[in-house]
Amino acid sequence: MKSLKAILAMSFWTIFALIILYLIDAHINYQQIGWSIGIALALLTIHMVNMVIYFNLTGKEPYKWFRNS
């Protein structure tokens, strides 16, 4: 259940950040070098924040693919 909450929080953060990128017209100016570096840094930051959100919400119990029975 913790993983589901973390994925939901990550989804909200990612959608919010992508809306901000859309509103500043990043999708139009991606061919300019300054914009492309800024967009790359923004996407890297979005990914790093997603990792922080996931590990803070799930704690020491991340999603387990296989459960030992």
Image: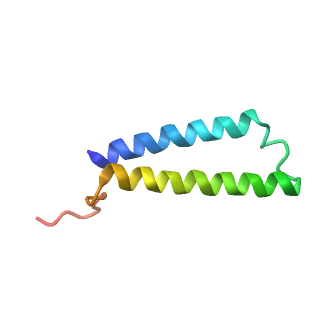
| Image quadrant where one finds the N terminus | top left
What residue is rendered at 53% in x and 57% in y? 48
How many marks overall? 0
6 sits left or right of 17 in the view: left
What residue is rendered at 58% in x and 36% in y? 16
Point out the residue furthest to the left here.
69
Point out the residue furthest to the top here.
23
Q: Quadrant of residue 24?
A: top right
Residue 64 pos. (x, y %): 27, 61
Name the image colouring: rainbow
Residue 4 pos. (x, y %): 33, 44
Residue situated in front as seen by the camera: 53 or 4: 53
| Image quadrant where one finds the C terminus | bottom left
Residue 65 pos. (x, y %): 29, 62
Residue 41 pos. (x, y %): 69, 56
24 sits left or right of 56 in the view: right
58 sits left or right of 45 in the view: left
What residue is rendered at 41% in x and 46% in y? 7
Point out the residue furthest to the right here.
32
